[in-house]
Structures are given as structure tokens and as C-alpha cells.
Image (tube, rainbow, N blue to C red):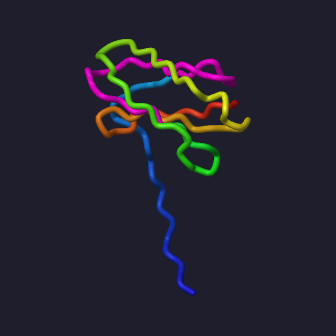
Amino acid sequence: FNYGSLLAINLKSNNKVSIQLSPNPFVDNFSVKFIGIENATAEILIANALGKSVLNKRVSVTKGYNNIQVDGLSSLPSGTYLATVVVNGKVVGSQKIAK
């Protein structure tokens, strides 16, 4: 057998946008708060612990403070999820959230 070498990949964003999710843990919904660097279209992606997408919400965001409500999560089973914010096709932040 011949194995390739391991590579380290740094997924830090150059946009320096930090996201805040609350409440954590959530029951039925949560808020995604962040400061946008421009008016844009954003996607809120929620994936379960296996990486399977469970929600994709597209919203318009503005330059400055944004507070996006993510609803309709009551049917999700308890567990850990990864919320990712994508603005204009670029990942600007990710955070784990529990239900």
C-alpha cells in the first residue's frame, strides 16, 4: 500500500465576520447575528452531525448589523448541528449549535 501525505487546511475567512447564534441550545428557533460588510444575499445552512443538510435559508442582508431568525426547527431531533453563514458564495462564519 502507498498512502499520500497529510495536508493541513486552514478555513479562516478573510472577511473577519463573526457570527453569534442564540439561544444555544435552541428548541424551535434561533437567531443568527452578525455585522455584514456589504448589502448581499446570504444563506444560512444547517447540517447535522453527519454533515447532512437539514435546512437552507436564503435571505437578504445589509451592510451593518443583521439579526436573522431561523424558524421551523421543532421537528429536528435533539443533537448537535453546524450553522454556516454564506454571503455571496463565500463562507463567512460557522458555529456549532445544540438542540
Q: Residue at x 49, y 75 (%)?
A: 4
Total of numbered circles in the picture? Answer: 0
Placement of 99 over or under 68, stated as above or below: below
Farthest residue in the top direction? 65
* Left or right of 26, for residue 89: left
Q: Name the spot of residue 43 as percent of width and height, x first.
A: 40, 33
Q: Residue at x 60, y 19 (%)?
A: 22
Q: Residue at x 38, y 37 (%)?
A: 13
The part of the chain drawn in magenta is: 20-45
Q: Quadrant of the N terminus?
A: bottom right
* Left or right of 93, for residue 80: right
Q: Name the spot of residue 73 as percent of width and height, x first.
A: 61, 29
Residue 29 is covered by the magenta coloring: yes
Specify the principal SS of the magenta part. Answer: strand
Placement of 13 over or under 10, stated as above or below: above
Q: Residue at x 38, y 12 (%)?
A: 65
Q: Nearer the viewer, residue 8 or 46?
A: 46
Q: Nearer the viewer, residue 15 or 63?
A: 63
Determine which quarter of the picture holds residue 23.
top right
Placement of 56 over or under 40, stated as above or below: below
Residue 67 is covered by the magenta coloring: no
